[in-house]
Image (spheres, helix red, strand yellow):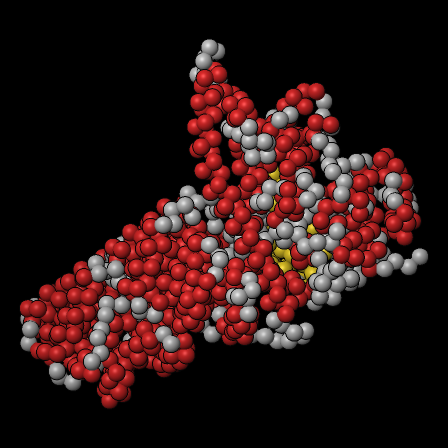
């Protein structure tokens, strides 16, 4: 008999079920299959019993069409960029190999999952590539990371997953003879990991004990998170539900009906897992879940009390029985609406507090109170205490329950709405075989969001939030501001809740703050922060943006204050995000750098990158930000070559994620500044021109200003004063330009001072240099830029006859350069400051002091910018002449 593609997927699913059974039970299982499986029964029987003594692996090897590739895999084979080491798992839908990168770029070993469905689904490769980065964003100690996914040259799809050395959940519980409390604690680890993913809008779809490994330390690791979504064919209808990627034994009724999985689908699967973990039995008769028959949609699971002995019933009766019953409701609306609610009830059970799964009666609450405080409740006063406490606990719990319920409902609704928007964007926003750039996709997302604001306010607000966040992450603040401004104008007419409005407000503040509207941005953020204590994720986000605004405006104490508060609040949030932690740790490093604590800053960046690499997120947008900011630190500490290495990391990442593959304007500016410090003027000019072009298109005047300032500085270094004057003309105070203390504003002042000095306008030059220094000092900022400003003013003192001031300024420049350098590493900032100091001593006739300073200058300049740099040559010539 010829089998269809759907038959083969049925067959693979049944193989998963039968291979879980002891060999002696397989005959009875075969006979229990209902008539709708007649088309595959004989093939399955032949595969199982063709030869006596056939092993599981042999069965699968002999199955026609089961292998995705036309040949059998062996150790040493290459699949995409991975080399197979040994087979570590086998199932009806896939094989799993221990593997490693063949190119040696990463030393870690991975579990390489090779699905058996490529010949049946031609769209799988595109879907893997489209979704892998979304799934790879899951960073939780309880979730095995999806590092990579793709399709090899021979059309074999592969998924590179974190390798976990452990045993399955049920095996661990059985072999360790865990108590009831220990089993509950183990299950809570699983549920917390699932809740983390749900908060990021990702549903597992195929939760089961074999997808949960427990390592030797007793820590759980969920496998295959979101893999079912990758493997499930696009556009599958209810009539095709038999071909969907889920395990019937743990599937929710709606999955058999072909409905799209939701958070409550995973809740149901968790309920089945907990049922089995506590009772050792399934809530269904085997013939029900093995066949996946349609009747299971309406079939109520058995009570856990019906499958355990008397001792088990005594332990489970009451709260746990009710919790399981609620999780296993056939109607999704009657289950726990979120995994967090499920976890909360289990925690309340373990603390002898009332659970939401049971009727909220006075007697029940009183009994729970007495049980919890049995030691202090005297026999004679038990009733009185129970009555009093019942009232108090009820009032207290009512407030907590309302807040938790509202938060859970909001998370659920937002997850559903966000899923709907992104699904629509990817299915309707992109045509078949259409090549769409990232910029075009975001533009279509904006247009699609606009079409939603009247009919679906929640989806509209979430779509705007996501699009704006993407623009912000790529430095396109003008586009972000425009999208968010429209949304906030409409919030008075939208029923989306305070939390959603506040989220939009914080992103709007981040955008306008980056565009230079600092007072307005600060006011918005501080108002939201003051009212966001009950919303941990929002609180962290807004505090982080407040720290960013302080940082970008050279407010060193403010930057450190707010980022330290961000770090503190994030550490106690229920959902720990490793990538966000890396971002916060990196920004803590930036704040330390602004405050002259360079060594501590360096350690923070090292820790941030270690977190990102440990979690496989070292090619993410957050990694892009961390490497960019680490490069800025290296500029400040006088390490331009090191800065370029960090910027290269950032540029390489930006090519993967930035619109059209072009680096963000601020990254171009940072790299251009570094190239200028190395006297690589042509390269610097190219970066600065591109920065200006990108920033101008985005309407970011601050970034345009910075690009112009450094471009003028390059022109001065090349001796083209006319060109420098043309570039700086719009920023001339005589033309009404008002400067500020942002990096762009201070750079304009510094370059204007250098231009006036080059033209012999010494008094005006001194006034501008002094404004730069005062700007740094007022902000409490102690960075390499301040040392450079003192060194430049010292050079001015040498030409306008202020020798005493020149010596003082040079000494201050050296002091700051020493403070901000990275330990004992050479620093071009220290080199330039020492060169100014050597020239000042020489002008005063102190040859010994001059020689000592010039020696330091040569050592530091040659070790950072090279022997051929103009300043190195100048320092060496003066040192030779002083001997």
Hey, which quadrant is residue 55 in on the image?
A: top right
Q: Name which residue lies at 46% across and 54% down.
A: 497
Of residues 234 and 876, the one nearer the viewer is 234
Q: Residue furthest top?
A: 380
Q: Name which residue lies at 50% across and 20% down.
A: 370
- Quadrant that contains the N terminus: bottom right
Residue 683 image point, x, y percent: 38, 79
Residue 234 image point, x, y percent: 70, 62
Residue 13 image point, x, y percent: 78, 49
Q: Is residue 693 above or below residue 468?
A: below
Q: Is residue 254 visible?
A: yes
Q: Residue furthest bottom?
A: 722
Of residues 38 and 267, the one nearer the viewer is 267
Of residues 347 and 482, the one nearer the viewer is 482
Q: Name which residue lies at 38% across and 55% down.
A: 542
Question: On the rendered structure, is 851 left or right of 710?
Answer: left
Of residues 468 and 194, the one nearer the viewer is 468
Q: Residue furthest right?
A: 1
């Amino acid at each position: 008999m010829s089998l269809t593609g759907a038959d083969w997927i049925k067959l693979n699913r049944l193989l998963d079920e039968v291979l879980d059974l002891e060999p002696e039970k397989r005959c009875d299982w075969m006979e229990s299959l209902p008539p709708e499986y007649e088309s595959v029964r004989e093939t399955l029987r032949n595969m199982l019993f063709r030869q006596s003594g056939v092993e599981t692996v042999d069965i699968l090897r002999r199955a026609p069409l089961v292998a995705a590739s036309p040949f059998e895999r062996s150790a040493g084979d290459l699949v995409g960029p991975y080399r197979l080491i040994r087979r570590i798992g086998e199932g009806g839908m896939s094989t799993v190999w221990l593997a490693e990168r063949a190119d040696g770029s990463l030393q870690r070993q991975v579990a390489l999952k090779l699905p058996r469905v490529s010949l049946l689904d031609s769209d799988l490769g595109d879907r893997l590539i489209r979704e892998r980065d979304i799934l790879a964003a899951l960073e939780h100690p309880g979730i095995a990371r999806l590092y990579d996914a793709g399709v090899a040259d021979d059309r074999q799809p592969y998924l590179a997953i974190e390798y976990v050395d452990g045993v399955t959940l049920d095996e661990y519980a059985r072999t360790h003879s865990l108590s009831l409390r220990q089993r509950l604690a183990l299950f809570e680890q699983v549920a917390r990991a699932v809740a983390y993913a749900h908060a990021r809008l990702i549903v597992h779809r195929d939760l089961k004990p074999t997808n949960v490994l427990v390592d030797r330390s007793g820590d759980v690791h969920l496998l295959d998170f979101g893999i079912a979504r990758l493997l499930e064919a696009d556009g599958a209808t209810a009539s095709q539900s038999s071909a969907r990627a889920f395990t019937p034994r743990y599937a929710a009724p709606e999955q058999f009906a072909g409905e799209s999985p939701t958070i409550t689908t995973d809740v149901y699967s968790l309920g089945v897992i907990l049922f089995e973990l506590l009772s050792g039995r399934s809530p269904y008769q085997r013939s029900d879940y093995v066949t996946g028959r349609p009747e299971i949609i309406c079939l109520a699971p058995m009570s856990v009390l019906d499958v355990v002995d008397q001792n088990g019933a005594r332990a489970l009766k009451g709260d746990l029985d009710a919790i399981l019953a609620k999780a296993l409701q056939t109607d999704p609306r009657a289950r726990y609406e979120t995994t967090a609610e499920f976890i909360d009830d289990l925690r309340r059970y373990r603390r002898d507090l009332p659970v939401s799964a049971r009727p909220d009666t006075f007697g029940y609450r009183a009994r729970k109170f007495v049980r919890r405080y049995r030691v202090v409740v005297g026999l004679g006063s038990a009733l009185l205490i129970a009555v009093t406490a019942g009232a108090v606990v009820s009032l207290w719990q009512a407030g907590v329950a309302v807040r938790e319920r509202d938060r859970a409902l909001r998370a659920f609704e937002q997850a559903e709405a966000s899923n709907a928007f992104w699904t629509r964007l990817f299915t309707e926003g992109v045509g078949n075989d259409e090549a769409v750039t990232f910029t075009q996709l975001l533009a279509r997302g904006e247009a699609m969001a606009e079409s939603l604001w009247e009919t679906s306010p929640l989806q509209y607000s979430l779509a705007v939030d996501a699009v704006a966040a993407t623009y912000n992450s790529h430095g396109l603040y003008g586009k972000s501001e425009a999208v968010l401004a429209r949304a906030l104008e409409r919030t008075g007419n939208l029923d989306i809740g305070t939390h959603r409005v506040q989220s939009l407000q914080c992103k709007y503040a981040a955008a306008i703050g980056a565009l230079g509207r600092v007072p307005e941005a600060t006011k918005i953020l501080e108002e939201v922060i003051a009212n966001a204590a009950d919303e941990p994720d929002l609180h962290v986000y807004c505090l982080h943006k407040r720290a960013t605004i302080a940082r970008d405006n050279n407010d060193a104490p403010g930057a450190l204050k707010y980022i330290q508060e961000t770090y503190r609040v994030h550490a106690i949030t229920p959902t720990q995000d490793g990538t966000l932690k890396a971002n916060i740790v990196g920004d803590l490093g930036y704040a330390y750098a602004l405050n002259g604590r360079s060594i501590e800053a360096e350690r923070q960046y090292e820790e941030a990158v270690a977190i990102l690499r440990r979690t496989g997120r070292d090619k993410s947008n957050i990694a892009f930000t961390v490497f960019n900011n680490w490069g800025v630190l290296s500029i400040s500490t006088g390490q331009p070559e090191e800065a370029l290495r960090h910027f290269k990391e950032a540029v390489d990442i930006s090519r993967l994620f930035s619109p059209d593959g072009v680096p963000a304007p601020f990254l171009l500016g940072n790299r251009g500044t570094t190239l200028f410090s190395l006297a690589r003027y042509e390269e610097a000019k190219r970066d600065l021109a591109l920065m200006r072009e990108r920033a101008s298109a985005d309407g970011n005047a601050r970034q345009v200003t910075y690009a112009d300032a450094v471009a003028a500085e390059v022109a001065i270094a090349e001796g083209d004063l006319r060109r420098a004057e043309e570039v700086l003309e719009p920023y001339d105070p005589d033309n009404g330009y008002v400067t500020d203390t942002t990096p762009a504003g201070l750079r304009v002042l510094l370059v204007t001072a250098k231009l006036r000095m080059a033209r012999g306008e010494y008094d005006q030059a001194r006034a501008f240099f002094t404004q730069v220094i005062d700007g740094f000092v007022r902000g409490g900022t102690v960075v390499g830029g301040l040392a450079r400003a003192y060194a430049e003013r010292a050079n001015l003192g040498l030409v306008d006859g202020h020798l005493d001031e020149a010596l003082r300024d040079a000494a201050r420049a050296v002091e700051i350069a020493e403070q901000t350098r990275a330990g004992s590493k050479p620093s071009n900032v220290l080199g330039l400051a020492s060169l100014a100091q050597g020239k000042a001593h020489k002008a005063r006739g102190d040859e010994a002091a001059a020689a000592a300073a010039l020696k330091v200058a040569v050592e530091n300049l040659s070790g950072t910018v090279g022997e051929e740099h103009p300043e190195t040559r100048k320092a060496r010539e003066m040192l030779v002449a002083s001997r």
